[in-house]
């Protein structure tokens, strides 16, 4: 089983977590202490990383608004894509955002993201992908980390239920 590390928590700063010693209590991560413990944003208490689980939303449950924002990041289009110019299609393994002739953004449930222009060529840059993953992590979506494709599947996180 994979373990929660300081690197992973750094990628998901601000998300909620659960500490095994406090049943039912949900906390917000405010940082990581020098001792590599998680810091509760509200109380400043620290919690041993090895006894914490992040609380994340699976990518299969991405909101339409967040999917559109990812599409805008990938196609350099904060210049012109609006919600009424997009069409969302949720299929078995991914969400597709059609952007009015500019192309299609696909966000797969396994954490992969791609931008395909109108000629069906994959055209996103590494910088755009990093920005898209940073955006999704800031919204507490399970994008995995490194070679771990899903933190929920690896037992490092639990799925958010609302």
Image (cartoon, helix red, strand yellow):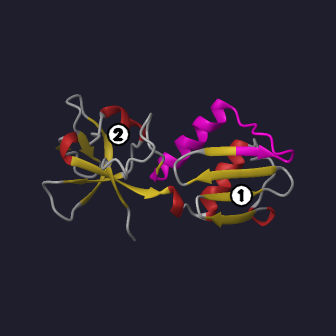
Q: Residues within 10 Å of mark 1 (few under 14, many from 20)?
A: many
- The x, y position of residue 27, in whole percent, is 27, 55
The 10 Å Cα crowd at callout 2, few under 14, some 14 to 19, many 20 or more, is: many
Viewer-side residue, 46 vs 156: 156
Left/right of residue 71 with respect to residue 8 in the rendered view: right
As helix, strand or loop, the secondary structure at mark 2 comes to: helix
- Whether residue 71 is situated above or below residue 31 in the rendered picture: below
Q: Which mark is residue 9?
A: 2
Residue at image location 81% in from the left, 62% down from the top = 85
Based on the picture, tell me whether residue 125 belongs to the magenta stretch: yes
Q: Nearer the viewer, mark 1 or mark 2?
A: 1
Q: Position of residue 64 (x, y in %)?
A: 63, 64
Q: Quadrant of the C terminus?
A: bottom left
In the image, is 78 to the left or to the right of 14? right
Q: Residue at x 60, y 43 (%)?
A: 132
Q: Residue at x 52, y 63 (%)?
A: 61
Q: Nearer the viewer, residue 73 or 78?
A: 73
Question: Which residue: 64% across, 31% down?
Answer: 127
Describe residue 13's horizontal placement relative to residue 93 as left or right.
left
Q: Which residue is mark 1?
A: 97
Give the percent coordinates (x, y) of residue 34: 23, 28
- Picture quarter with the N terminus: top left
Q: Residue furthest bottom?
A: 162
* Label number found at residue 17: none
Image x and y of residue 40, in percent? 25, 48
In the rendered image, the residue lying farthest to the left is: 21
Whole-number angstrom distance, CA of label 1 to CA of label 2: 29 Å
Q: Which residues are magenta?
A: 115-141
Residue 87, quarter of picture: bottom right
User: Which of 140 and 150 lies nearest the eye of the viewer?
Assistant: 150
Which SS class for mark 1? strand
User: Is 1 rendered above or below residue 161?
Assistant: above
């Amino acid at each position: 089983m994979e373990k929660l590390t300081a690197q992973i928590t750094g990628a998901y700063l601000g998300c909620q977590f659960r500490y095994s010693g406090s049943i039912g209590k949900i906390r917000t991560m405010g940082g990581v202490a020098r001792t590599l413990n998680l810091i509760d944003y509200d109380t400043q208490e620290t919690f041993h990383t090895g006894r914490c689980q992040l609380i994340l939303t699976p990518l299969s449950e991405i909101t339409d608004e967040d999917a559109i924002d990812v599409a805008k990041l990938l196609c350099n289009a904060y210049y012109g894509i609006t919600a009424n110019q997009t069409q969302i299609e949720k299929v078995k393994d991914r969400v597709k955002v059609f952007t009015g002739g500019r192309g299609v953004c696909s966000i797969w449930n396994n954490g992969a993201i791609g931008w395909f222009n109108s000629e069906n060529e994959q055209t996103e840059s590494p910088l755009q992908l990093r920005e898209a993953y940073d955006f999704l992590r800031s919204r507490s979506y399970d994008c995995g980390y490194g070679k771990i494709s899903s933190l929920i599947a690896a037992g490092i996180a639990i799925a958010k239920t609302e």
